[in-house]
Amino acid sequence: MHELSLAVEIVRLLESHATELQRITRLTLDIGTLSCVDEQALRTALASAMAGTLAAGADIEIHTVEAQARCQDCGQTFQPPDRIEPCPHCGSFKKTWLKGEDFRLRSVEGLSASP
């Protein structure tokens, strides 16, 4: 379950905000459909990893980024359901990924630390 290691890394990133925030109330993530990250497993891992930190109990908002590719043969853009789907326009398997491999922490919200 690599979601646990991802959650630990996210918490490390969140801890870098410890000097500016006294509490993190919300974090927003972008997860691509091709990223091989299970959303529910990540939510569970984050809840565990955030316990006892300034992000404990924070809302977790996840945006799914749909896969998008451009065919290298015909130039058409399409949304394949998986990595092996050929171009629906010409049948070519050669493609360049434009979206869907994403995994990033988009934003962090919280209560400001007292000066």
Image (spheres, rainbow, N blue to C red):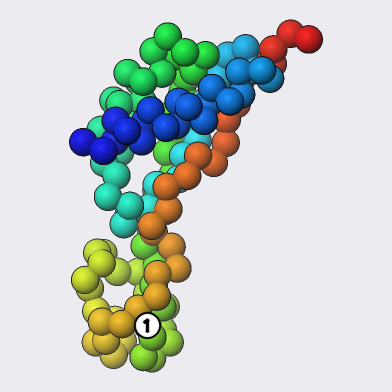
Q: Nearer the viewer, residue 80 or 12?
A: 12
* Residue 33 place in picture, x, y as percent: 32, 54
Q: Is 90 placed left or right of 98 in the picture?
A: left
* Residue 27 place in picture, x, y as percent: 51, 30
* Residue 42 shows in the view: no
Q: Is residue 5 above or below residue 96?
A: above
Tell me how many marks there are.
Answer: 1
The 10 Å Cα crowd at callout 1, few under 14, some 14 to 19, many 20 or more, is many
Residue underneath mark 1: 71
- Quarter occupied by the C terminus: top right
Tag 1: amino acid: Cys
Which residue is farthest right?
A: 115
- Under circle 1, the secondary element is strand
* Residue 115 shows in the view: yes
Q: Is residue 108 above or below residue 55?
A: below
| Residue drawn at the location 31% of the way across and 82% of the way down | 94
| Residue drawn at the location 27% of the way across and 86% of the way down | 92
| Residue drawn at the location 66% of the way across and 17% of the way down | 19
Q: Is 34 placed left or right of 60 in the picture?
A: left
* Residue 56 place in picture, x, y as percent: 45, 14
- Quarter occupied by the N terminus: top left
* Residue 21 place in picture, x, y as percent: 64, 17
Q: Nearer the viewer, residue 114 or 87?
A: 114
Q: Quadrant of residue 100?
A: bottom left
| Residue drawn at the location 50% of the way across and 39% of the way down | 105
Q: Is 111 placed left or right of 87 in the picture?
A: right
